[in-house]
């Protein structure tokens, strides 16, 4: 039995209430895995437009949060799920918007305030509703939490025993805002120093969190090493090297209650490693739904489900795809949205190869599951990948991943379960896809590979145990 601690997570996303990517998946599953170990766990997220229908109840009508010389009056809603308390911070002016971080005009200009209020509200929730041993912040949106906690602990003994952990899910998003707005989020000018919150002439919320927290984690062992180098460090590699003694990589898990082809309600047929016949049905349904020819059922079908961001390696796909589809008998279903240049790339591919390339530009959870199940191979040639969850889901769905060996992709895929390449160029991707196509031709060997992947286990429990050990090391009661 572990010493039970009380852990308050602060995040901008949590499945199923608010999601743009894997961060939400983590916050939808890790807290329950920690609760299963005996800890008390709560998650604080904004009550966004999309979260307003969650069956939560209002527990605080008006909670005054002071920030930047003003008062933000927020409401607090709570909802218990799988032994975890989710607290929603309600402030329609800040969170009830068309988008999590921005809209068609770009990022919201007041994101520092939106997430500053969230962090401050979390401290109030800890004081009033959820006495906290460990504050655990995720990504730049929670970066101001450790800064505020230090200041609060200096005047209020209630926070004295608390410790902070920051998890980096993606170093590519630094949460930058101009120096002249520091006062809007109660940061004194004295913090504007290169060894504190200053970042190349501006302020980085992520850097602030990484400087002021007690421990740093990131979401794979390999990424923990990579971010200490200039190639992957986004100019924070010096800080991360200096804090390497407090930095650990803990691999994400997969939530197999949501991602399991044997019991996935979003699929037209279920299947297991022992009986793969349902997968063929899923493939036929996917081809039909996406308007690809029926005869493609015996041909290799590639799948992509992704945010369209340069991180995901779409520049390599731009280099390799024309040759692949011109020369090989291979098909693709791509689902995603994001940067318009990549949306255009997929539009152009679809127009050039309408019988081979099907696309869906947007966010579509149902289709994400259908692609995981219906495709033969999953493409993830990322430039960098802190962990990556889709390749882990793909393994479970018998959809063989083709990945670049970086971050969590390198840690989760091996030569028996998928195809990996190292150099970030279109040629390396092309050759790797060709190798996968050759392997696909040998049905027996291919099924062996599928089944090997399906039997891999990336459950959350072992990762939750590593977080638990870290919390215990940090906390005097642990
Ligand atoms: P990242 O967090 O960098 O986006 P991950 O692989 O960790 O990458 O997680 C991506 C998550 O988001 C997965 O659950 C995936 O299914 C989901 N996802 C990404 N894009 C879409 C989309 N367009 N529609 C539905 N789900 C998506
Ligand atoms: C980020 C990363 C992804 C990771 C996810 C959850 O969005 O890009 O690699 O799996 O966070 O940690």
Image: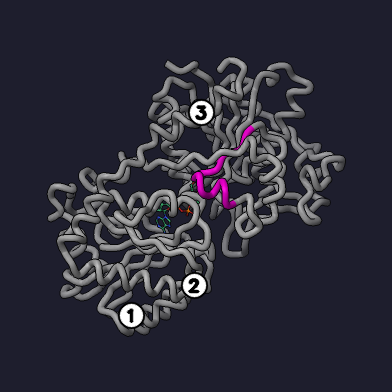
Magenta residue check for 222: yes
* Depth order, front residue of 76/144: 144
- Residue topped by disc 1: 325
- Residue topped by disc 2: 425
Single out the mark in the foreground, 3 or 1.
Answer: 1
- Dividing the picture into quadrants, the one containing residue 138 is top right
State the extent of the magenta-drawn residues as a range: 215-226
Q: Quadrant of the N terminus?
A: top left
Magenta residue check for 258: no
Question: Going by the image, does 56 lie left or right of 115?
Answer: left
> Looking at the picture, how far across and down is residue 40, in whole percent?
48, 22
Q: Quadrant of ligand 1?
A: bottom left
Q: Secondary structure at mark 2?
A: loop
> Looking at the picture, how far across and down is residue 279, in whole percent?
18, 56
Single out the mark in the foreground, 2 or 3.
Answer: 2
Badge 1 crowding class, 10 Å Cα cut-off, few under 14, some 14 to 19, many 20 or more, is some
- The answer to whether residue 209 is seen in the rendering is no
Residue at x-position 56% and y-position 38% = 248
Compared with residue 153, is residue 199 higher up or lower down, i.e. above or below?
below
* Depth order, front residue of 433/305: 433
Measured in 3D between alpha carbons, the distance from the residue under mark 1 to the one under mark 2, in whole angstroms, is 18 Å
Sequence order check, earlier mark of 3 and 1: 3
Q: Mark 1 near mark 2, Cβ–Cβ under 8 Å?
A: no
Measured in 3D between alpha carbons, the distance from the residue under mark 2 to the one under mark 3, in whole angstroms, is 43 Å
Sequence order check, earlier mark of 2 and 3: 3
- Residue topped by disc 3: 42
Compared with residue 212, is residue 353 higher up or lower down, i.e. above or below?
below
**Residue 291 has which mark?**
none
Residue at x-position 33% and y-position 58% = 418
> Looking at the picture, how far across and down is residue 448, in whole percent?
20, 55
């Amino acid at each position: 039995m572990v010493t039970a601690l009380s852990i308050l997570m602060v995040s901008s996303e949590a499945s199923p209430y608010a999601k743009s990517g894997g961060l939400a998946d983590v916050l939808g599953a890790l807290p329950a895995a920690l609760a299963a170990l005996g800890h008390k766990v709560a998650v604080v997220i904004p009550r966004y437009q999309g979260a307003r229908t969650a069956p939560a109840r209002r527990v605080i009508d008006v909670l005054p949060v002071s920030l930047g010389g003003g008062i933000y009056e927020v409401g607090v809603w709570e909802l218990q799920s799988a032994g975890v308390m989710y607290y929603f911070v309600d402030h329609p002016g800040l969170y009830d918007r068309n988008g999590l971080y921005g809209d068609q005009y770009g990022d919201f200009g007041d994101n520092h305030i939106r997430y500053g209020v969230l962090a401050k509200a979390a401290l109030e929730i800890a004081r009033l509703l959820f006495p906290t041993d460990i504050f655990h912040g995720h990504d730049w949106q929670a970066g101001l939490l450790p800064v505020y906690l230090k200041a609060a602990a200096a005047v209020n003994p209630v926070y004295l025993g608390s410790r902070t952990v920051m998890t980096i899910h993606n170093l590519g998003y630094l949460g930058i805002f101009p120096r002249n707005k520091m006062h809007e989020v109660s940061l004194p000018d004295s913090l504007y120093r290169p060894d504190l919150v200053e970042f190349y002439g501006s302020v980085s919320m992520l850097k602030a969190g990484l400087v002021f927290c007690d421990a740093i984690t990131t979401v794979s062992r390999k990424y923990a090493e990579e971010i200490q180098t200039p190639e992957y460090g986004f100019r924070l590699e010096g800080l991360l090297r200096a804090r390497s003694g407090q930095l650990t990589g803990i691999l994400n898990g997969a939530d197999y209650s949501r991602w399991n082809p044997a019991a996935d309600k979003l699929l037209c047929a279920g299947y297991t490693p022992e009986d793969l016949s349902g997968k063929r049905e899923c493939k036929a349904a996917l081809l039909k739904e996406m308007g690809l020819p029926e005869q493609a059922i015996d041909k290799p079908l590639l799948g992509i489900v992704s945010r369209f961001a340069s991180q995901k390696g779409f520049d390599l796909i731009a280099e390799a795809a024309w040759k692949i589809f011109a020369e090989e008998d291979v098909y693709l279903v791509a689902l995603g949205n994001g940067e318009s240049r990549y949306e255009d790339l997929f539009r152009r591919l679809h127009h050039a190869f309408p019988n081979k390339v099907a696309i869906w530009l947007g966010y579509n959870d149902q289709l994400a599951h259908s692609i995981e199940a219906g495709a033969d191979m999953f493409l993830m040639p990322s430039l960098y990948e802190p962990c990556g969850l889709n390749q882990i889901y793909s393994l479970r769905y018998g959809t063989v991943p083709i990945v670049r060996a970086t971050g969590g992709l390198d840690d989760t895929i091996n030569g028996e379960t998928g195809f990996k390449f190292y150099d970030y160029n279109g040629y390396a991707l092309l050759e790797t896809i060709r190798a996968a196509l050759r392997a696909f031709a040998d049905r027996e060997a291919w099924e062996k590979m599928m089944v090997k992947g399906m039997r891999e286990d990336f459950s959350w429990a072992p990762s939750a145990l590593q977080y638990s050990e870290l919390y215990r090391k940090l906390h005097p009661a642990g």
